[in-house]
Image (spheres, helix red, strand yellow):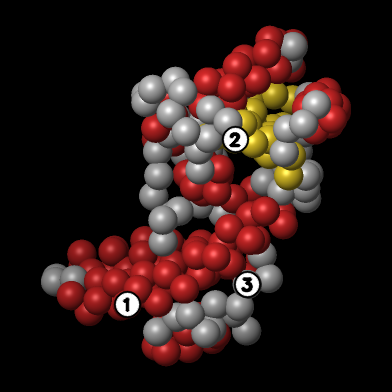
Amino acid sequence: MAFLRTSEPERTRGASEGACHLYVLPCAYEDLLKLGFSRQPLERMQALHPRFFEFFDLDRALLVETETVRDARRLELELGHRLNEHSAPAPLTVRVQAAGLTEWYRGAYPLLAQAVEGLAQTGHTVHAPLRGWIQAQMQARAPALFGWGMAVLDRVEGEPGHLDRMQMLHALRQQVLDVLDAHRALDIDVGDYLPDALAQWYARRSR
């Protein structure tokens, strides 16, 4: 799936290339949130945490559409300047390789929710809560699960060496569970999209 691996290319490409999104991602179990921008918010969330659907509170998360990356970056900077006293370290469970260790804030959700509401009133398209938007994105990509599933099965069968294979299988199994559990959390039935062998394995795991 496209959201299995990603980076944050917005910070290295041209400042005005294509539409973008400002995101506010509150954590599910503490008063901490991530503010940022991305062309691909779903991939960005998965890059920050493999179980983003549990780590972030999707029913409180906010997304603002912008016409350019420059617009999204400007909004992030403007909002971030208002939140200096709320700055907080990133959670230890956030992936370091996702370049997500900055723009974390504690106690800032009410301020950002109000700011996003103001953006909506001035004509920005806002997705709040974010769960419905993510669900639609994942549902549209669900047909690609079959090809992804076949690649998973081929990788399991083709890995040489007993010890290496066992280590690989452990990591791959968790990756597969992260992807499929994300669909289940968003009420997307993956059974009709997966190869039979993988669908049966996941059905047994999900009981």
Question: Looking at the image, which residue sits at the far left?
Answer: 160
Q: Mark 2 or 1 closer to N-term?
A: 2
Across and down, in percent, residue 125 comes to 72, 38
Residue 179, placed above or below residue 46: below
* Alpha-carbon span between mark 2 and mark 1: 32 Å
The nearer-to-camera label among 2 and 3 is: 2
The nearer-to-camera label among 2 and 1 is: 2
What is the number of the mark on residue 150? 1
Q: Residues within 10 Å of mark 2 (few under 14, many from 20)?
A: many
Q: Mark 3 or 1 closer to N-term?
A: 1
Name the residue type under label 1. Answer: Met
Asked if residue 42 shows in the view, the reply is: yes
**Front position in the image: 61 or 207:** 61
Q: Residues within 10 Å of mark 3 (few under 14, many from 20)?
A: some
Name the residue type under label 2. Answer: His
Q: Residue at x 69, y 24 (%)?
A: 105
SS at mark 1 in the image: helix
Quadrant of the drawing holding the N terminus: bottom left
**Front position in the image: 112 or 137:** 137
Q: Residue at x 72, y 57 (%)?
A: 132
What is the number of the mark on residue 202? none
What is the number of the mark on residue 188? 3
Reading the image, the residue beneath label 2 is 21
* Alpha-carbon span between mark 3 and mark 1: 19 Å
Across and down, in percent, residue 173 comes to 41, 68
Q: Residue at x 77, y 31 (%)?
A: 123
SS at mark 2 in the image: strand
